[in-house]
Image (cartoon, rainbow, N blue to C red):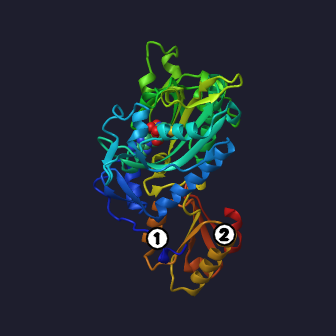
């Protein structure tokens, strides 16, 4: 992408309304713009990160056998009346009337809808297990939206739903998804800590939240210090992981925690995913039953699994930034490489920049070529801010000797290289 043809409205000054670093950096780097309280537009740089996260989530959902569907944002109130949640979901639900005075709502979640889809289309245990997911915008009228897209009112969620014939297979399914979540966050480049949590209004009696540790997190988690090397080990042993103490704040009871003070860690954190074993809460009340192998009608066993896709964009920045800006994990970076042509009036700089740009694109490396007439200092600031994992800096002095600088954004390490070897260093 040529920066002269892109849309990257970088801000020089600090946006006043932003209280946390991820919100500040997402505004300054031209990733999002606020349209109303808790409601944002995603500009090209931000949307590309969202898409890269979606690609990783899709890959891992499909790998664990979850099939993608797409349910609507707008839901009929009748569904939520049938599940008994319409009245008690609370003020977070945005309800409205259509022109025929039907009551509709902007879906905050989809258990009721997916249960109806299942109920109307699957009748036999032979069709189980099933796992369906979608990635769709949700609306929750948060009383205090804050921290940019971290706690928004309109936000993007991946929500998956599994269906099994009995509790034993449902818990096995739940554990498969638990592992798929650990792998998903690892592919994104995040170390998450899964903690036992409350099911809350979703329902059920088993639930884990997936947290990343950051000083700006709204949550607090408590866990056994042994957890950290376990969770970062190559092979993920679910029994061992789930046997260690790791709980969300509402579940932490110091009187019941058997860990010695020096064994217990706690930290501020951000919840980026939440999974729930629900059981038959929805299938019973909505009569979603199947014939079991004895020909009896049984309510199916369900679980639901959420990932905050848009929240993740901010959470990753909270976990990976420095005083110059964002440090992108390579798997979700909108551009792997930024080419900084320091003098667009110098023919040698232009020649090397254009050739490298073409070579990187031929090798399917995402690249942003800064071909603007911005001053050198401004180019350095912009590309440190947007956080491409690599910068190739091409200045007149080096260019006449075919020498350029390759900078690693994460380490800050800069090495002088012949232009011929740069592409090989990045692939
Ligand atoms: N207001 C919000 N803004 C941004 N992300 C949010 C917001 N509320 C929740 N999320 C994200 O969405 C994830 C799932 O939300 S949830 O309420 O925990 N779970 C559900 O709604 C279930 N239906 C999962 S299928 C959360 O872990 C969090 O990462």
Q: Quadrant of the C terminus?
A: bottom right
* Mark nearer the N terminus (2 vs 1): 1
Q: Residue at x 33, y 42 (%)?
A: 142
Residue 215 visible in the shown view: no
Does 38 sit above or below residue 356? above
Specify whether 164 is left or right of 255. Answer: right
Whole-percent x, y for residue 342 in the image: 51, 76
**Residue 373, quarter of picture:** bottom left
Whole-percent x, y for residue 161 in the image: 56, 38
Residue 68 visible in the shown view: yes
Specify whether 229 is left or right of 150. Answer: right
Q: Nearer the viewer, residue 234 or 80?
A: 80
Q: Nearer the viewer, residue 219 or 122?
A: 122
Whole-percent x, y for residue 40 in the image: 37, 56
- The local secondary structure at tag 2 comes to strand
Q: Which residue is the site of mark 1?
A: 379
**Residue 52, quarter of picture:** bottom right
Q: Whole-Å distance between the Cαs marked 2 and 1?
A: 20 Å
Q: Quadrant of the N terminus?
A: bottom right
Specify whether 180 is left or right of 137. Answer: right
Rate crowding at label 2 as few (under 14), some (14 to 19) or many (20 or more) other CA atoms within 10 Å.
Answer: some
Question: Residue 7 has which mark?
Answer: none
């Amino acid at each position: 992408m040529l920066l002269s043809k892109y849309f990257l409205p970088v801000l020089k000054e600090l946006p006043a309304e932003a209280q946390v670093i991820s919100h500040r950096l997402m505004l300054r780097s031209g990733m999002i713009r606020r349209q109303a309280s808790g409601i944002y537009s995603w500009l090209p740089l931000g949307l590309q990160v969202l898409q890269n996260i979606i690609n990783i989530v899709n890959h891992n959902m499909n790998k664990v056998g979850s099939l993608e569907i797409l349910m609507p944002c707008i839901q009929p109130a009748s569904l939520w009346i049938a599940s008994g949640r319409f009245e008690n979901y609370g003020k977070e639900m945005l309800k409205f009337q259509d022109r025929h005075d039907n009551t509709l709502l902007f879906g905050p979640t989809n258990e009721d809808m997916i249960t109806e889809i299942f109920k109307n289309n699957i009748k036999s245990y032979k069709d189980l297990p099933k796992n369906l997911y979608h990635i769709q915008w949700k609306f929750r009228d948060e009383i205090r939206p804050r921290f940019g897209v971290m706690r928004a009112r309109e936000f993007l969620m991946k929500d998956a739903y599994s269906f099994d014939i009995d509790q034993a297979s449902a818990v096995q399914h739940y554990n498969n998804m638990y592992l798929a979540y650990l792998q998903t966050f690892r592919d994104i480049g995040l170390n998450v800590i899964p903690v036992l949590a409350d099911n809350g209004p979703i329902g059920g009696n088993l639930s884990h939240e997936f947290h990343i540790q950051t000083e700006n997190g709204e949550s607090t988690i408590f866990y056994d210090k042994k957890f950290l090397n376990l969770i970062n080990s190559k092979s993920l042993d679910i029994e061992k992981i789930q046997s260690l103490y790791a709980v969300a704040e509402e579940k932490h009871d110091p009187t019941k925690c058997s860990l010695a003070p020096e064994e217990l860690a706690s930290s501020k954190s951000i919840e980026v995913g939440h999974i729930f074993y629900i059981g038959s809460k929805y299938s019973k009340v909505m009569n979603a039953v199947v014939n079991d192998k004895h020909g009896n009608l049984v309510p199916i066993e369900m679980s639901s699994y959420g990932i905050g896709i848009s929240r993740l964009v901010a959470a990753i920045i909270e976990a990976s930034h420095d005083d110059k800006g964002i440090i992108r994990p390579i798997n979700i970076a909108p551009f792997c490489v930024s080419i900084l042509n320091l003098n667009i009036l110098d023919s040698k700089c232009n020649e090397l920049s254009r050739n490298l740009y073409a070579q990187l694109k031929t090798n399917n490396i995402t690249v942003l070529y800064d071909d603007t007439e911005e001053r050198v200092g401004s180019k350095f600031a912009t590309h440190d801010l947007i956080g491409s994992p690599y910068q190739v800096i091409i200045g007149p002095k080096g260019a006449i000797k075919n020498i350029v600088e390759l900078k690693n954004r994460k380490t800050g390490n800069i090495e002088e290289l012949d232009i011929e070897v740069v592409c090989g260093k990045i692939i």
